[in-house]
């Protein structure tokens, strides 16, 4: 018995020393650890978002159900992982609106350590009927379901100035996308797409409903900026709050041909860049727009150098000042998930690494969420589909791993 106890203490000390060695060299030795949060299943699991609690606990949320907007059983699920734990806790229902699909959770932890949940409630089984909801909780780190302290819809009313700005961009978009290198069918697709933007925006109810979150909320000079998009007419905007989420108002539109699901980065000079999925006609590129007034107004969306197959992506600013992109950096398919890094605030992306991959048609890795935790680690979650079964995968890696090989 004494020998067993001594052996146990030796094993405990070896584990502690190994943990210290790994944590102390995390930024030097390339590190990648990946695992699924729950066993793959036939149900649809998609659009995850990850955040870190003040004590280092990770919380991941996603939507789960028999489908998406057309399935009324879709609800938000979540799981926690405690510091030092080797596994994720059993998943639980984060929120469920009975009889309505709940989609696209976006999580935020404020300066008080409270958890914010922004998500889409689908009123009539179409993306255009989305009602944006916000919930907050100061009691979210204990085991089991989150106990919400308050909840209310985020009501946004883009007005006539919004419509004026949007319509003012459409003739230029029509001209730019009527290039001779496009086929007549592609030019017709562009014209119909732009006409759909105009018709959708002229409907006041259509302008006020349908706004959905996807990526993390970003702050600049005390202002909260929640990136939103409208899947009905494929444009984006930002919900702005100058009182830490007590009230919200819409920014001007971010106008382009199919720019949705924005992710926001802030430059050192305070200007903001929105990076958006390409939801329109070809070519397939991650789209970008800029704001120099803390998200009030935006330049038109234009192509970046990053390929995009019509899939969600996220771009974040690291504490080092470098920018990091995660997404499907290919023009077709979701079989490859990559991480790119930029040292010049998104002008170039020379550092590239594949995070997950399969042969085309043999797997899907998409809709990633990414954070940098207090210990300098990078944590990503994404939707994974293999063999017709779905789960949410989590990976912890470091900058050294991204730099250790080119994509």
Image: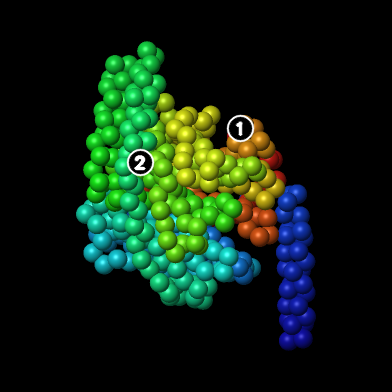
Q: Is residue 346 above or below residue 396?
A: above
Q: Quadrant of the N terminus?
A: bottom right
In the rendering, at what x and y percent does residue 126 appear?
25, 49
- Residue ID for mark 1: 347
Front in this rendered view, residue 104 or 246 = 246
User: Label 1: few (<14), some or many (≥20) within 10 Å?
Assistant: few
In the rendered image, the residue lying farthest to the front is: 161
Nearer to us of marks 1 and 2 is 2
Which residue is situated farthest in the top direction here? Answer: 180
- Using the rendered view, name the quadrant where residue 197 is placed: top left
**Residue 77 horizontal/vertical position (percent):** 40, 64
Circles 1 and 2 in contact, beta carbons < 8 Å: no
| Residue occupying image coordinates x 59% and y 39% | 340
Residue wearing tag 2: 161
Residue 34 visible within the image: no
The residue that appears at 53% across and 63% down in the rendered structure is 109
Q: Image height check: is 184 above or below 104?
A: above
Q: Return the disc, 1 or 2, that comes first in the chain's sequence.
A: 2
Residue at image point 57% right, 69% down: 112
Local SS, label 1: loop
Q: Nearer the viewer, residue 189 or 84?
A: 189
Lateral position of residue 110 relative to residue 163, left or right: right
Q: Spot the residue most to the bottom.
A: 1
- Image quarter in which the C terminus is found: top right
**Camera sees residue 237:** yes
């Amino acid at each position: 018995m004494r020998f067993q106890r001594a052996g146990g203490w030796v094993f405990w000390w070896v584990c502690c020393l190994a943990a210290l060695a790994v944590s102390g060299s995390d930024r030097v030795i390339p590190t990648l650890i990946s695992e699924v949060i729950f066993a793959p299943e036939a149900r649809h699991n998609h659009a995850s978002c990850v955040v870190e609690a003040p004590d280092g606990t990770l919380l991941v949320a996603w939507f789960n159900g028999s489908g998406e907007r057309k399935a009324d059983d879709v609800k938000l699920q979540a799981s926690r992982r405690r510091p030092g734990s080797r596994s994720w806790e059993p998943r639980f229902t984060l929120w469920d609106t009975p009889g309505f699909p709940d989609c696209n959770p976006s999580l935020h932890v404020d300066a008080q350590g409270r958890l914010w949940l922004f998500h889409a409630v689908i009123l009539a089984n179409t993306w255009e009927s989305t009602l944006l909801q916000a919930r907050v909780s100061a009691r979210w780190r204990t085991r089991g379901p989150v106990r919400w302290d308050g909840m209310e819809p985020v009501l946004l009313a883009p007005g006539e100035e919004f419509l004026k700005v949007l319509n003012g961009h459409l003739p230029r978009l029509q001209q730019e996308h009527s290039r001779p290198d496009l086929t007549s069918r592609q030019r017709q697709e562009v014209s119909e797409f732009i006409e759909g933007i105009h018709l959708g925006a002229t409907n006041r109810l259509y302008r006020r409903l349908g706004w959905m979150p996807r990526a993390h909320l970003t702050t600049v000079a005390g202002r909260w900026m929640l990136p939103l998009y409208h899947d009905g007419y494929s444009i984006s905007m930002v919900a702005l709050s100058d009182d830490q989420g007590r009230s919200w108002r819409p920014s001007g539109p971010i106008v382009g041909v199919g720019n949705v699901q924005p992710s926001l980065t802030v430059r050192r000079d305070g200007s903001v860049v929105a990076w958006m999925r390409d939801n329109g006609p070809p070519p397939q590129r991650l789209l970008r727009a800029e704001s120099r007034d803390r998200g009030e107004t935006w330049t038109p969306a234009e192509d970046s150098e990053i390929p995009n197959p019509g899939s969600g992506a996220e771009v974040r600013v690291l504490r080092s000042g470098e920018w990091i992109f995660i997404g499907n950096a290919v023009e077709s398919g979701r079989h490859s998930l990559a991480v790119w890094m930029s040292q010049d605030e998104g002008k170039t992306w020379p550092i590239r690494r594949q995070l997950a991959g399969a042969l085309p048609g043999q797997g899907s890795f998409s809709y990633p969420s990414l954070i940098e935790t207090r210990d300098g680690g990078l944590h990503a979650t994404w939707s994974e589909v293999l063999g017709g079964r779905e789960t949410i995968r989590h990976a912890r890696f470091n900058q050294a791993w991204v730099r250790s090989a080119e994509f």
